[in-house]
Structures are given as C-alpha cells and as structure tokens.
Image (spheres, helix red, strand yellow):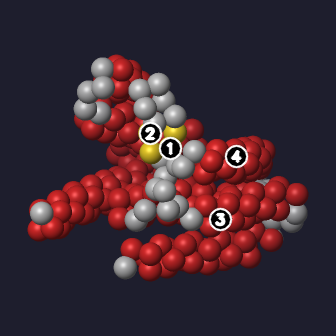
Amino acid sequence: MEKNLKLEKARQEDSALNRALLWVAGAIILEVLLVLIDRYYINFYTDEQSVALALGLGTAVRVCCVLFLAVFVAGAVWTGLRWKKKAALMLPWGITLAGFALFVFFALIWRFNSDGVALLYVIIPAVAVLALVYYLYQRECFLAVALTALGLLGMWLVRKGSYGPYATLIDVYLAGMAVVSVLALIALALLQKRGGVLPRKEGGIRVLHKKTNYPLLYVTCVLMLAAFVAALVLVPTLTYYLIFALIAWAFILVVYYTVQML
C-alpha cells in the first residue's frame, strides 16, 4: 500500500513537472517570436524589401490578434459547456488559456508597438516562472508570489512610463491592483472562515489547504496594497526601492515554502 502511494505521488510530481516544462517551452517559443517581430517589424531597415516585410508582419499581427480572440471566446464557451456537463476540462481549458495568451501577445504589439514589445520581454519570462511556482509549489505559495509579481510589474511600469504617454493607464493599473489587493484580503478572510473551501451547490471546491499559512498571505496582500498606494501618491523614484523590496519578499516566500516542502 505504501509503495503504491509513493508511486502515485511520483507520477503526480512527474506530471506537474512536465506541465511546467510545457509552459517554459511555450515561453521560449514566444520569446524567439518576439525577437523576430522586434527585429523585422519594430526596428526594420528602410530599404524596400524590409519595409514590405514589416508591412506584411503588421498585417499578420492584426490578423492573429482577431484570430486568437475568436479562439479564446470559442474555448471559453466550450469550457463552460463542459463544466456544466461535469466533463473533462483539460483540453478546452488549455485552448482557452492559449487563445487568451496569444491574443494578449499580439494585441500588445498591435496597440503599443515598441512599448508593447518591451513589456512582453518582461511578462513572458515572468509568466513562465509563475507557472513553475504553480506546478511545483503549494497553491498558497503561487497566490502570494503571483500577487507579488503583479506588484513588481506595477513598479516597473511606473519606472518606465510615469512621465510618458501611458501615465494615466499606469495609474489605472495601480488603482485597480490596489482594489484587487483589498478584495484578496476579503476573499482570504472568507476562505479561512470556511476552511479553504469555496461553497457550491454540488459540494465545495477546495481552494487552499487546511494548513494554509493565512497570516503570510495577509501580509503579502497588505504589502502589495501599500506598494500600489505608495506608487500612486508618492514620487516615482520611490518605486526603484520598492522593486528591490518586492524582489526580496518574493525570495523570502520561495525560501519559506521550499523549506515547508522538505
């Protein structure tokens, strides 16, 4: 019996690792594609052949944006139908997620051009790292690290564009994430009261483990809320120090949860 449990645990760990590696592989492919787009669509030469190629890539970017938006919507509908039937969700959910990711990828390039490419250079590896955390660590670790990553993104955006044409958009992001931090605090309090289970008609859905360290998650939410508010109301130069503070907090989280797994 004990041997079977060990084999099952090993199988689950291998499956989680394979899924994480798929995310890493996808991130590498997108990074290569991003480099090519940066070279031949954003920073193209002015000779006739290069201009023609850039125009063709521009058309391809717009077509892909619309195409993957349609894939995302279709996948979401399919996932909803499968959810109601209580059928397997892996394939429709995977298509939905892939469609959404590729839609965001091409939409950022279409709408923001070189600024969108610069942002994607940061987002793509960050998402790959978050996928590793999701599959290899506890769910509470992923939630804490993901919220910290959103905080880091906000600080990076302020550093790069607080005085640029997207300053208002960045302020909207910071304000929105401050609200998300508050909502996360409320959701955690409700989950803690219900033992980490989200109630449903057909039975509850376990969101967090019974032994979840809720105080650490509360501290993370409060730190992110403080960082977003500080970035909104204080001088942008403060975000330089906030970036290092959030990186240090992410490192503390990973070390803590790594020790918990040993």
Q: How many neighbours does mark 3 have within 10 angstroms: few (below 14), some (14-19), or many (20 or more)?
A: few
What residue would you read off at disc 2?
205
Mark found first going from the N terminus, 1 or 4: 4
Q: Is residue 180 left or right of residue 127?
A: right
Residue bearing mark 3: 215
Lower position in the chain sequence, tag 4 or tag 3: 4
* Displayed quadrant of residue 62: top left
Q: CA distance from mark 1 to mark 4?
A: 14 Å
Specify the quadrant of the image occupied by residue 95. top left
Mark positioned earlier in the residue sequence (2 or 4): 4
Q: Amino acid at mark 3?
A: Pro
Residue under label 4, please give it. 186
Instruction: Please say whether residue 159 is visible from this viewpoint.
Output: no
Q: Are marks 2 and 4 in contact (CB under 8 Å)?
A: no
Q: Amino acid at mark 2?
A: Ile
Mark 2 and mark 1: Cα distance apart in space:
5 Å
| Residue 70 x, y percent position in the rendering | 39, 24
Instruction: Answer whether labels 2 and 1 touch (C-beta < 8 Å).
Output: yes
**Alpha carbon distance from label 4 to label 3:** 13 Å
8 left or right of 76? left
Q: Secondary structure at mark 4?
A: helix
Q: Are marks 1 and 3 in contact (CB under 8 Å)?
A: no
- N-terminal-most mark, 3 or 2: 2
Q: Quadrant of the N terminus?
A: bottom left
In the depicted structure, whether residue 166 falls above or below residue 11: above
Residue drawn at point x = 52 percent, y = 34 percent? 199
Q: Which residue is mark 1?
A: 197
Q: CA distance from mark 1 to mark 3?
A: 17 Å
Gap between marks 3 and 2, in whole Å? 22 Å
